[in-house]
C-alpha cells in the first residue's frame, strides 16, 4: 500500500475562494455555514485528484486545505477562525465522499500575535466531530511580516504542543503564502521555511519537553539533508546535543523531485523517519521534457534505491505514516479491489 | 593552486566592534578615520587565519568583512556608509600586510529603503583606491524586516548591476544577520537566503538585461542542487526559460560540508560555474567527532570525485575564480616557495 501523506485540495470549486473574497472584501462577513455546495459539485472537483492518484499508483492520501490559501496573516483572528472552519468542513465533506482514498487533515485558526492556544478548540472539533487525523501548522503566521512569528521551539507554541501531545495527533509544519517579495512561495519560501524549522526543532530542548510530539517537515526538510554537516558542525561548536541525535525525533516527507535528493534524504534521515509524499497536483505537476514523465512521479525514486530493504520501503510508503497517524484505520483505506 | 573565494575577517581586533558600539550607542558618531590600529595589532589578528590556510592547503583567499557584522538594517544610510568605509579600509590594510595570501573584497553601504545606487561611489573607491577585486552584496537589506528588500531580479537593483557590469567586478550575494526570530543566522538564514536568490536570479529575465553580471551565490546555493527538479518543474509549469539554462549564468561557491552535497553541487551545476570555498574559521570550524577532522576540510571532497577531470578540478580550485575575478593578478598571489 502507498499512502501519500501530503496533498492539498487545490482543485476545490471556485465557490470556496469566492467566499473568501466576500469575507475579506466586505464588512458584512459571511459565516462558514453560508457556503452552499452540492455533493455532485464536490465530487466533480475530486475527479482529477483521484484520477491522478490512480495513475501514480497511490492508494490513499492525507487531504488537507490548500496551503497557500490558509493566509493566516490576512484579517483578524475571527476571520482566520471562520475561514478555517469553512475549509475544514469542506475537507470533511470531500473525504466523506471518497472515504477509502482521502483521509482528512485540517488547518488551524492561527493569527499573527495571537497565542496558538486559540487553535485547540478547532483542533478538538476536527478530531471529535469530523474524524480528522492530523493538522497543518503554519510556522510563519504573519507570512514573514511583523509581528514576527516566534521560532517553532519557542514557548509561545507550547499550548499547541500540549494539545497535540494530548490528542496524540501529528502536525505537518507547512507555511502558507509570504509577504516577502524576495521569496517565491513554491520556489523558495516553502522550502526555506522547512529548512529553518528543521534547524530550530533540533537546536534546543523542545523534544525533551514534549517527547511525544509528532511533527512532520515537508519537502524533504527543504535542505536539511544537503546541509547535514553544516547542522552537525554548529551543534558541535555550540556544545549542543548532536544534530544527528536530535533529528531522530523529526519526521520528513518525501516531496522532493530528484532521484538523488530522495536517496540522500532517506540515507541521512534514516528510513524510520520518512513518510512518503509526492504532493500530487502540487508544485511538480508539470512534465519533465527530458524524460516525458511528470516530475511528481517519484515512487520509483524510492523503489529504485538498491540498498533499501523491502521492509524499509514499506515503512516509507505506509508503515511509518500509519504508526504516526494512529487515527487512521488501515483496514478502511486504500483502493478497493474487485469483489472486495 | 587553491584559492578560497569566501573568507570573512572574523578575527578582526575587538577595537572594530568597539567602534561600532560607539557608533550605534552614542549620538556623537565617530568617523571612519577614528579607528586607530597598529600594523602589529592587525598582523596579530591575521595569524590564526593564515595558519589555518596553511593547515588546509589554501594558497590565497578572498578576504572580506564579517558578513554578520554588516548590519545594514541598523542605523541610517550614513551610519551604514561610515561603518562600511571603516570595514573596507581595514580589509585593505589587512590584505596589504599579507598581499600574497589575502585578496580584498568589500561590503557596500546598503540601507533599507535606500536605492543601491548609493553603493556605486564606495564601490569605485574600493576598486580604484584600495585595489579590491569584488564585493559582498546583502540580498536582505532590512534583515527580514520592513521595508522588505525587493527580490534580486527587481529593477530596484539595476543601478548597482549597471555599476558592477561597468566595473566588470563580481559580487558574492551574502546575507547579514536577521531580525526574524524563527531564523538562525548560520543554521538557516544564510542558506535560505542563498536558495531564494538562486530561484529568483533564474526565474526572470535579469541576465537578458545584464548579460555580463557576475554574481556568486555562497554555500552551494543553499539548497538549489537538492531542489533542482523543483525549480525545473516550476519553470516548465509557468512557461519560463528552462531553469537548467538560466542557472548557467549563476556562479556557486562550495562552502558545503558534506562530501555527497559537494558531489551533487558540482554534478548538477557543472564544473564551469563552481568556485572553491571552505569558509575557513566560519560556520564549520569545529571538529567532526566521527572523523576527528574539522568539518571545513573539504578539499578532499573535490579531489575525491572520481568523475571530475584534472582540468575541471583546477577550474574549481582557482581557474574559474581567476576568470571571474579578473582584477586578481594570478602571478602575485599564492604561497611563496622558498627562494622565490
Image (cartoon, coloured by chain):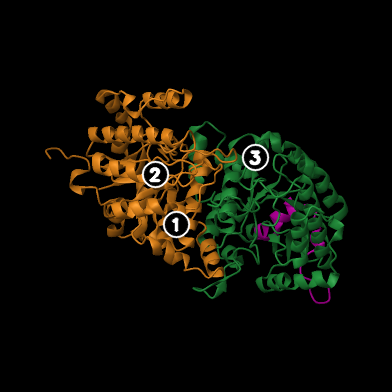
Chain colours: A green, B orange
Range of the magenta residues? A314-340
Disc 1, SS: helix
User: Can residue A21 be seen?
Assistant: yes
Disc 2, SS: helix
Identify the residue shown where x is 37% and y is 60%: B210
Q: Position of residue B103 (x, y in %)?
A: 27, 41
In the picture, the quarter occupied by the C terminus of chain B is top left
Q: Which residue is mark 1?
A: B264
Q: Position of residue B246 (x, y in %)?
A: 43, 64
On the same chain, marks 2 and 3? The answer is: no
Q: Is residue A320 left or right of residue B96?
A: right
Q: Nearer the viewer, mark 2 or mark 3?
A: 2
Q: State the residue in front, B202 or B43.
A: B202
Residue B339: image quadrant is top left
Q: Chain of mark 2?
A: B
Residue A47: image quadrant is bottom right
Q: State the residue in front, B57 or B85.
A: B85
Amino acid at each position: 500500500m502507498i499512502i501519500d501523506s501530503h496533498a492539498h485540495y487545490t482543485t476545490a470549486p471556485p465557490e470556496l475562494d469566492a467566499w473568501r473574497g466576500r469575507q475579506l472584501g466586505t464588512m458584512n462577513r459571511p459565516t462558514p455555514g453560508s457556503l452552499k455546495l452540492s455533493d455532485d459539485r464536490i465530487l466533480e472537483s475530486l475527479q482529477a485528484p483521484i484520477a491522478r492518484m490512480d495513475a501514480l499508483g497511490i492508494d490513499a492520501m492525507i487531504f488537507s486545505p490548500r496551503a497557500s490559501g490558509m493566509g493566516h496573516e490576512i484579517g483578524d483572528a475571527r476571520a482566520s477562525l471562520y475561514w478555517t472552519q469553512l475549509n475544514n468542513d469542506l475537507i470533511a465533506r470531500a473525504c466523506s465522499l471518497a472515504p477509502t482514498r482521502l483521509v482528512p487533515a485540517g488547518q488551524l485558526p492561527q493569527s499573527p500575535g495571537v497565542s496558538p492556544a486559540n487553535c485547540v478548540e478547532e483542533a478538538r472539533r476536527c478530531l471529535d466531530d469530523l474524524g480528522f487525523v492530523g493538522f497543518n501548522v503554519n510556522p510563519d503566521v504573519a507570512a514573514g511580516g511583523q509581528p514576527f512569528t516566534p521560532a517553532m521551539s519557542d514557548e509561545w507554541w507550547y499550548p499547541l504542543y500540549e494539545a497535540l501531545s494530548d490528542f496524540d495527533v501529528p502536525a505537518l509544519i507547512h507555511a502558507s503564502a509570504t509577504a516577502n517579495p524576495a521569496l517565491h512561495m513554491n520556489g523558495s519560501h516553502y522550502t526555506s521555511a522547512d529548512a529553518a524549522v528543521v534547524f530550530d526543532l533540533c537546536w534546543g530542548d523542545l523534544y525533551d519537553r514534549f517527547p511525544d510530539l509528532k511533527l512532520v517537515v515537508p519537502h524533504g526538510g527543504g535542505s536539511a539533508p544537503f546541509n547535514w554537516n553544516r547542522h552537525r558542525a554548529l551543534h558541535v561548536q555550540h556544545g549542543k546535543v548532536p544534530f544527528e541525535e536530535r533529528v531522530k525525533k523529526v519526521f520528513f516527507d518525501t516531496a522532493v523531485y530528484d532521484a538523488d535528493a530522495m536517496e540522500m534524504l532517506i540515507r541521512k534521515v534514516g528510513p524510520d523517519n520518512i513518510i512518503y509524499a509526492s504532493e500530487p497536483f502540487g508544485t511538480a505537476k508539470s512534465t519533465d521534457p527530458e524524460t516525458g514523465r511528470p516530475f511528481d512521479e517519484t515512487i520509483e525514486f524510492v523503489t529504485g534505491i538498491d540498498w533499501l530493504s523491502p521492509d524499509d520501503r514499506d515503512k516509507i510508503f505506509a508503515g511509518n505514516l500509519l504508526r504516526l497517524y494512529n487515527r487512521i484505520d488501515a483496514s478502511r483505506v486504500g483502493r478497493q479491489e474487485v469483489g472486495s
